[in-house]
Image (spheres, rainbow, N blue to C red):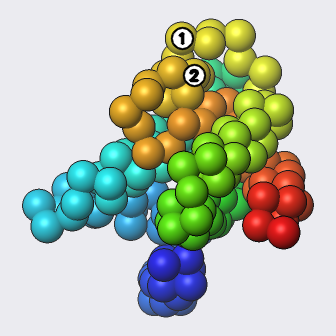
Amino acid sequence: MFVLAQSIMVAQAQTEQNQSLFETVHKYATAIVNDPKSSEEQIQTNQFKVTALNYITTQVMKRGLKKDEYFFDSQAVNMQSFVSEFLMNLDKARAISAAKRMEVIKVYRDASLKNPLLNDTDRERTYCYVNDKQTFTPFSLDTDWEKAYEQATRNIKTVFK
């Protein structure tokens, strides 16, 4: 699943060379959300991605921060990898036990919460997915996806020893 998502993103990035990786991830996630053939899990997961990318863009502009294309591309690609690997590890854990599944959720949720991007104090907004018990993506919108991905990748190894 992760490899397929990454391959599709790379192929789209190559065919749309004038478009940033950030825009490619956003466009791809939006297309899945709007596709009537998408499953509920696909829709919810990709709606999170769209919301998170919109959050980053809005907050950077609102705060008057100067960020280059690399910043946005890095956040988008690391978020894509973070979510894809989360779902892959969640499936792997489901086959083992409910307790293992909860360990995976904790590793990724903690990585998201412990690596804020902008230190936004509006928890109602930034934790809307964290506090939603029905979501497939219990992560903060205010996440530095590069750091969170590094932490989750490092910590998930202890779950599957």
Label placed on residue 124: 1
- Residue 69 is left or right of residue 46, and the answer is right
Q: Nearer the viewer, residue 127 or 105?
A: 105
Q: Residue at x 48, y 85 (%)?
A: 4
Q: Quadrant of residue 90?
A: bottom right
- Residue 129 is left or right of residue 145, and the answer is left
The correct choice, above or below, for 30 with respect to 157 in the image is above
Contact, CB < 8 Å: mark 1 with mark 2?
yes
Residue on which disc 2 sits: 127
Of the residues shown, which amino acid type is indicated by label 2? Tyr
- Residue 106 is left or right of residue 23, and the answer is right
The correct choice, above or below, for 136 with respect to 46 in the image is above
Q: Nearer the viewer, residue 15 or 52?
A: 52
Q: Nearer the viewer, residue 16 or 139?
A: 139
| x then y, percent, for residue 110 | 75, 37
| x then y, percent, for residue 70 | 76, 61
Q: Residue at x 21, y 63 (%)?
A: 38
